[in-house]
Amino acid sequence: MPDAGPIAVLPRRPLTVGELLDAAVLLLRDQARVLLPLAVALALAEQALLYPLRTLADVHPPGWWPTDQQRFGWYWLLLAVGAGTEAAIVALLGNPAARGGAAALLGRRPGPAEVLRAARPGATLLAAAAVGLAVGAAGLAGPAWFVAYGLLGLVVPALVLDGVPAHRAAGRAVRLAGRLGGRAAGIRLLGYLGWWLVRVGIGLGVPYGLGLLGLFDVSAWALPLAVAAQVAVNALAYPALACLDAVLHLETRMRTEGLDIRLSRAPAGVPEPVLLAAPR
């Protein structure tokens, strides 16, 4: 049974914040064979994309802090682009994560081939690009990033699971994230903050720690060490955040739309897309 016992990935009932965070980790564990390799490739591509901006901003590893005030504009652009690439990557990973989360809710454990057989891949790519651009643009405005990141996390789960047209996915996601006083948006920001602290700790700790050991000249290897540390931690953080979006989406629907009741009353043999379709 999908909702039997404490080890269920996603029980069929409204969850507490702690249970949602646990469910995201359990979903990541179940789908690690798919999500982690994808995340490594995307995290490497992100580092390659950010390298020219880091050069223009004159920031250096491991801290990437700005030292030239005249280049602060480039540094601000670097932060905004980094915020956008993060959001886009999490959205892309949200497709397989959402499919895995839906299967777990229905009592199945899909194999990698099923999860990789992405639903609506073209629409997902466009949605991820749009989310990345929106969050990046909001990042240029400073505090607006919090609003954009919190409200746009459920776009791909809405697109993949709810069966809504692509042009309605963003509106559907914003409405879900804003229900109950913005509960889903707040939890999404909480999850991001937790992983941000982990990322900063590892991104700074690995180069500085190796330097303290004095086994080799860390300064000569500062760039590859910093990039490797960031890729490694981001390859774990990004799919974890995508899994959080998946379970948040399904749990919000159970809490506000009675999805759990609908599933329990559905007759046998009803196709999964019909079971999970958004209410009209």
Image: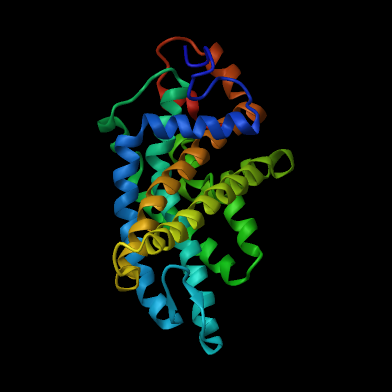
| Position of residue 152 measured from the top left corner of the image (x, y, whole percent) | 56, 51
The answer to whether residue 227 is above or below residue 34 is below
Q: Is residue 72 left or right of residue 120?
A: right
Q: Is residue 164 visible?
A: no
Q: Quadrant of residue 35?
A: top left
The answer to whether residue 92 is above or below residue 7 is below
Q: Nearer the viewer, residue 268 or 215?
A: 215
| Position of residue 42 measured from the top left corner of the image (x, y, whole percent) | 33, 55
**Which quadrant holds the C terminus?**
top right
The residue positioned farthest toward the left in the image shown = 113
The answer to whether residue 6 is above or below residue 197 is above
Colour treatment of the image: rainbow
Residue at (54% x, 20% y) in the render:
11
The residue positioned farthest toward the right in the image shown = 181
Q: Nearer the viewer, residue 114 or 186?
A: 186
Residue at (49% x, 81% y) in the render:
74
Q: Nearer the viewer, residue 115 or 263?
A: 115
Q: Is residue 230 left or right of residue 199?
A: left
| Position of residue 194 measured from the top left corner of the image (x, y, whole percent) | 57, 47
For the image, the number of numbered tags is 0
Residue at (41% x, 25% y) in the render:
103
The residue positioned farthest toward the bottom in the image shown = 70
Q: Is residue 21 visible?
A: yes
| Position of residue 27 measured from the top left corner of the image (x, y, whole percent) | 44, 31
Q: Quadrant of residue 62?
A: bottom left
Q: Is residue 57 left or right of residue 149?
A: left
Q: Quadrant of residue 30?
A: top left
